[in-house]
Amino acid sequence: MLRDLDFRLTGGGFYFLTGPSGAGKTSLLRLLYLAQRPTRGRIRLFGEELTDAPRDAMPHFRRRIGVVFQDFRLLRHMSAFDNVALPLRISGVREAEVEGPVREMLDWVGLADRSSARPATLSGGEQQRVAIARAVINRPDLLVADEPTGNVDSDMAKRLMHLFSSLNQLGTTVVVATHDVGLIGATPGAELIRLEQGTMVDPTGALRNPPGRGA
């Protein structure tokens, strides 16, 4: 259970979320990508107060968020191509403008030759890469990733983190939950959020209400 959290993400910032298993990382991510609402307290996102926002307003805000789930959550009946294309199609992008970006993204994550494969025929690492491509294809305002490199080798992990960094440089706020200290050390300028037993551990106070535009 999360408790006594009081923080602000600076728009365009890059954050690593760490802490032991059971510390509340997944619960915090679920709040960030609007999968649940706080039982008490307030949440503000994209300059809007969303704690009591009507349910039918949520899809508009969720379309501005890219999510990399730890369990992938790919649609099993769809090919890798169609899974990655889904956010564009939901956003109303014309079909003629879908293929180029999707194929470019699949090539970036090393799956250009697996575009027609369905999730059941992909390895865990390949499914993870499809999930990441789907999360970033729409250049979201906020990217939330739960252990995004847990199923790929170190070279691909570096490539994927470079993709996240590039997206961040274009203005996307990035929050990555990870246990991999190597990733944290290899990402200059990223800030660290650490949870323990459901609360934030921040001895320096650097993450409490930092200056700048909130996510």
Image (tube, grey):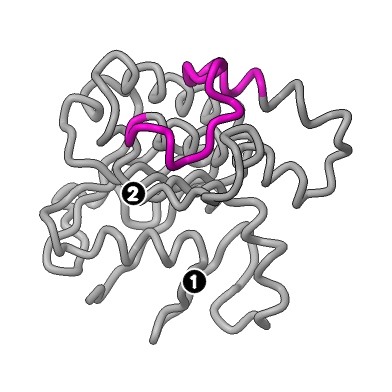
Instruction: Say which amino acid is labelled 1.
Output: Ile
Q: From what the image shows, is residue 93 above or below residue 154?
A: below
Instruction: Say which amino acid is labelled 2.
Output: Gln
Asked if the residues shown at circle 2 and circle 1 are in contact, with their CB atoms under 8 angstroms apart, the answer is no
N-term mark: 2 or 1: 1
Could you tell me how far apart the alpha carbons at marks 2 and 1 are, in whole angstroms? 23 Å
Q: From what the image shows, is residue 101 above or below residue 200?
A: above
Q: Quadrant of the N terminus?
A: bottom left
At numbered mark 2, what does the secondary structure look like: helix, strand or loop? loop
Magenta region's main secondary structure?
helix
Residue corresponding to mark 1: 43
Q: Image check: 136 left or right of 211?
A: right
Mark nearer the viewer, 2 or 1: 2
- Residue 28, by quadrant, is bottom left
Q: In this rendered view, identify the residue nearer to me: 152 or 120.
A: 120
Chain part drawn in magenta: 103-125
Residue ranking furthest to the front: 121
Q: Residue at x 16, y 31 (%)?
A: 181
Label 2 neighbourhood size at 10 Å, few (<14), some (14-19), many (20+)? some
Q: Image check: 15 left or right of 47?
A: left
Q: Residue at x 58, y 51 (%)?
A: 65
Q: In this rendered view, identify the residue nearer to me: 189 or 187.
A: 187
Q: Is residue 36 magenta?
A: no
Label 1 neighbourhood size at 10 Å, few (<14), some (14-19), many (20+)? some
At numbered mark 1, what does the secondary structure look like: helix, strand or loop? loop
Q: Residue at x 52, y 30 (%)?
A: 168
Residue 140 on image: x %, y %: 62, 42
Per the rendering, the mark at residue 126 is none
Residue 151 on image: x %, y %: 27, 33
Residue corresponding to mark 2: 70
Residue 211 on image: x %, y %: 46, 47
